[in-house]
Amino acid sequence: GQSLEQPSEVTAVEGAIVQINCTYQTSGFYGLSWYQQHDGGAPTFLSYNGLDGLEETGRFSSFLSRSDSYGYLLLQELQMKDSASYFCAVSLYNQGGKLIFGQGTELSVKP
Amino acid sequence: DTGVSQNPRHKITKRGQNVTFRCDPISEHNRLYWYRQTLGQGPEFLTYFQNEAQLEKSRLLSDRFSAERPKGSFSTLEIQRTEQGDSAMYLCASSLMAGGPQEQFFGPGTRLTVL
C-alpha cells in the first residue's frame, strides 16, 4: 500500500521560517507535490519535486530525498495569510498523474 | 477561462436518494480527476479520465458511484442510493497530459450532506 506521514499541526510566528516534513512509503514513486488549502477553499499547487534536491519558488521551497523517502516544504518570511493546511502528495509511475495525499499539516501563523 | 468549476456547490439529500455533480475543467486540459475529502483529511483519489476514457477507478469507489466524461469535456459524478458515509467534499481537478506529472488545478468542490 501507499502511505504518507506529515505532522498534523505546526505553529509559527509572522516573519519566521517553518519546515513541514513528509515521509512516504510507496511503490513506483514518481514525484512529490505540495498543495495549500485554506479553510473552505480548493487545494492549490505550490511545488513539485521529481528529482532529489531543492526547488525554490519565491518564499516557498521544497526538498526531496528519494533515497530517504523524505521531503519537506520550507516557508520563509511567514505571513498571516500562510495560515492554511499543507498537503504533500505523491504521484506514481504509470498512474496517470493521480495524486495520493497525506493527511495534511495545519499551519497557524501568529502575530 | 477562469479555472475549474463545479456545480452545485452544496447538496443536501436524504439517504437513499441519487445525486449528480458536474465538473467543468479548464478547456485545454485533457486529464480530469475526482477526489473526495472529509474533514481533517487529505483528498482521496476516486477516478480519472484522459479525454473521454475513464482510465482508473479507486477500489474505494463502490458500484453506487459512476462517472462519465462524454466528449472529453465536462464530467459528471453520480452517487446512487446515497448513504450517510457519502457525506464529504467532492473535488474535481484537471491537468494537461505531458511528459510527467503536471500541476492539478482544483475546483471549489461540491459539499454533499446526506441526512
Image: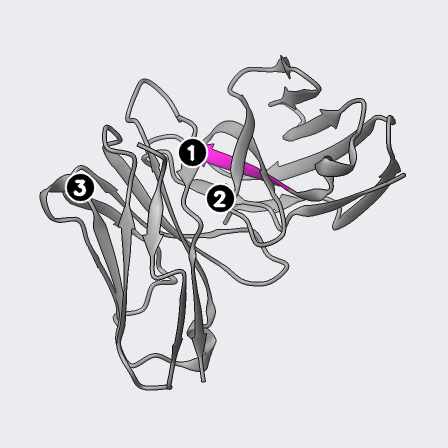
Viewer-proximal residue among A30 and A84: A84
How far is disc 2 from disc 3 in space, using C-alphas? 24 Å
Residue A17 in picture, x, y percent from top left: 84, 26
Which of label 3 and label 1 is nearer to you? 3
> Which SS does the magenta portion mostly show?
strand
> In the visual, does B42 lie left or right of A22?
left
Q: For label 2, count other residues whose C-alpha is less than 10 Å away and answer few (under 14), some (14-19) or many (20+).
A: many
Q: Residue at x 29, y 81 (%)?
A: B81
Gap between marks 2 and 1 measured at Cα: 9 Å
Q: Nearer the viewer, residue A108 or B10?
A: B10
Query: Residue A51: within the magenta?
Result: no
Residue picked out by circle 2: A100
Q: Are marks 2 and 3 in contact (CB under 8 Å)?
A: no
Image quadrant assignment for residue A6: top right
Classify mark 3: residues with Cα within 10 Å, few (<14), some (14-19) or many (20+): some
Q: Residue at x 73, y 42 (%)?
A: A83
Disc 2: host chain: A
Q: Position of residue A24 (x, y in %)?
A: 61, 38
Residue at point 34% right, 62% down? Answer: B8
Residue A78 placement, left or right of A66: right
Q: Are marks 2 and 1 in contact (CB under 8 Å)?
A: yes
Quick check: B80 above or below B91?
below
Residue A35, how many percent across, how many down?
57, 36
Q: Amino acid at mark 2?
A: Ile
| Chain designation of label 1 | A
Question: Eyeballing the image, is A16 above or below A86?
Answer: above
Residue under numbered circle 1:
A92
Tell me the SS state at disc 2: strand
Q: Is residue A89 left or right of residue B68?
A: right
Identity, as a three-letter code, of the amino acid under mark 1: Leu
- Magenta span of residues: A86-91
Residue situated furthest front in the rendering? B2
